[in-house]
Amino acid sequence: MIEINLLPGSGKKGKTKGGGSSVDVGAAFRGFASKISDPFLLGAVASGVLAAAAIGALYTQQLTRERSLDVKEQRAVKDSIQYSVVVASIRKAQAQRDSVVRQLNIIKVIDNNRFVWPHVMDEVSRALPPYTWLTSLQQTNPTVAPPANAAPAPKGGKTKGVNADSAAAAQPVQLQIIGNTVDIQALTRFMKALEASPFIEDVTLVKTSVIPVDGKEVTEFQLTGSYQQPDSALIKRVPISLSVR
């Protein structure tokens, strides 16, 4: 009798040396592939496999990137906390420095103006010629004290309070001198003596006029000038001694 096997691969399985059955995976795959003859189906299966592999690779990459970003974020937050403390301490130190600078400039303004009028009056009285007398000696510009609560400037710049203090410290004292003389040449000598003083500069004659004083005609004059800080070598310091009885 002749037997024909209509199901290839479905024959009797050989026994293994251990007595168990074995499965031929390669033969099964070849049998499955031999059943699929449509190339579009094969392409679709291959595309699905490639897509799954690509998705898996991208997912793994995104997870790795997420872990890296989390580590960087934690490090940045830690650095930000540390730097915020440093920045706050720097701003506090700058505010204290600006406050000290403003106070020092206020003291400087007061100290610079402390002996202005003694020097001015001493120089004017020394330069005053005979038969000439003064009726007015005053300051024409107001002395502006720098604001004690001036606001500091933005980061990287200078403070407005420091600039105001420096401007106030550098502001010269403008003088106005009004007097009378019976000799016009005495007025010329008076102006030259004032200009030669190390404490007074820019002496200018504003106007002159003839006025009656006690029944006599005299020349009234008006001068302007500025107080200047002389060189330290021109200032003589004399010790003050008091006798105690």
Image: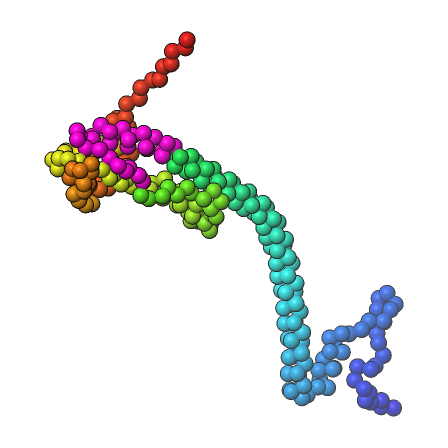
Q: Quadrant of residue 197?
A: top left
Query: Which contiguous range is marked in magenta?
Result: 111-139
Residue at 41% x, 38% y: name it: 105
Residue at 64% x, 61% y: name it: 66
x, y percent for residue 173: 31, 39
Camera-side residue of 5 and 49: 49
As drawn, 33 above or below 152: below
Q: Residue furthest top?
A: 245
Quarter of the image where the C terminus is located: top left
As drawn, 4 above or below 57: below
Q: Would residue 208 appear left or right of 77 to someone viewing this image?
A: left
Residue at 76% x, 78% y: name it: 28
x, y percent for residue 201: 23, 37
Q: Would residue 159 appear left or right of 80 to someone viewing this image?
A: left
Residue at 64% x, 79% y: name it: 47
As drawn, 78 above or below 188: below
Task: Look at the image and say whether residue 212 sits in the magenta stretch.
Answer: no
